[in-house]
Image (cartoon, grey):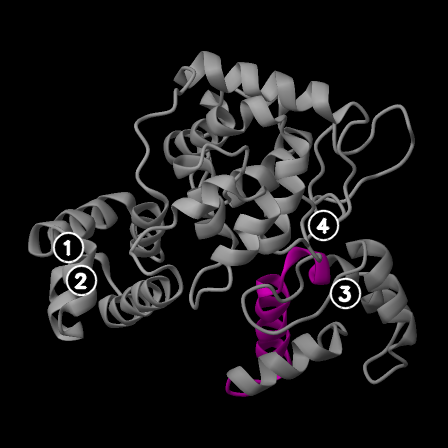
Amino acid sequence: MSGPTFFPQAVEEARASSTPRGATGSSRAAGRALRARPPALAEAALPRRLEEPCGGSSAAAKSLTKKKTGGVKRVGGRNRGQPTAKPRLSKRAAGKGTGVLRAKRLPAGWAIPKDKRRWVAKLTRALDAEYGRPQPWDPKSPLDELLFTLLSQNTNDTNRDRAWASLRAAFPRLEEILAADVAEVERAIAVGGLHAQKARRMQAILRRVQAERGRLDLDHLRDATDDEARAYLMSFDGIGPKTTECVLLFSLGRPAFPVDTHIDRVSRRLGLLPARVSTDEAHTILRDLVPPEDRFAFHLNLIAHGRKTCKAPTPLCNTCSVRALCRRRLL
């Protein structure tokens, strides 16, 4: 007497993995194969034992499997037969009360609250309460600040400071940097990284200033407008918006707003910047958004917040002092 009819694929697996031992042995092997299958497929297989003989149409089985498993996506590997993962939405992200589901990430053009000034003022007060209100320090000359900020490119503050101290120890006067062999300048600033590139650019800046001004200083920028100073500084090779804004803010005392990697990251998370804006465009957006009297303090405190709390790999949102004002909290 032959055994019961089983799910065809299970029978085939049993026949392939066992030695024929008669009808009873084959039925037992098929039963073991069926029990070893994922629960969702095993449930879908049971009704077919009564409805379809082996070799019957598979259309009903596909429909039944889809109904029983909630739309199983068959893929190879470890996830075979498991339901496709769906994004998890928080109550706030689900837009409760509106009947509209929002995506896990907000769209690129996410709108800042209407009263942007008031919102930024709250951010400024919260950061001041957390880190204190920074005050301007004794500034460097415009040319010294330009070279100092050039050394900060693609490195951290510690290595920048060490490179600057080493450079000025080896060459106390700017005229000595200009007259020195480029290899000597490279050795002096090696700790800052990219020393070959920075040494060549540094000497090129000094040569041009000497040729145009007859002396090594950029004090004429004190009488220039902000736009004139920006245009002149950015005409130097290797000098971009960040370096230009640093000279304006820290040396000339202008209401500029430099955007470094910390400010760019924190501003995007807070919602000050749209997701798809370039770093160069970020300078203009943030400069227009933050009031002139708050730019110096807001710039430094945003950097401090990026280093302490809103870190690059994983922000410490649970201890964030501006969490209630952060766009990330909406996700």
The stretch in magenta equals: 18-42
Q: Position of residue 100 (x, y in %)?
A: 89, 36
Element under disc 1: helix
Give whichever of discs 3 and 4 has the lower sequence position: 3
> Position of 266 compared to 12: left or right?
left
Residue picked out by circle 1: 167
Q: Nearer the viewer, mark 3 or mark 4?
A: 4
Graded by Cα atoms within 10 Å as few (under 14), some (14 to 19) or many (20 or more), the crowding at tag 4 reads few
Give whichever of discs 1 and 3 has the lower sequence position: 3
| Residue at (87% x, 62% y) in the render | 64
Residue picked out by circle 4: 86
Mark-to-mark CA distance, 3 and 4: 26 Å
Element under disc 4: loop
Graded by Cα atoms within 10 Å as few (under 14), some (14 to 19) or many (20 or more), the crowding at tag 2 reads many
Q: Nearer the viewer, mark 2 or mark 1?
A: 2
Q: Nearer the viewer, mark 1 or mark 3?
A: 1
Mark-to-mark CA distance, 2 and 1: 8 Å
Residue found at the far top of this picture: 129
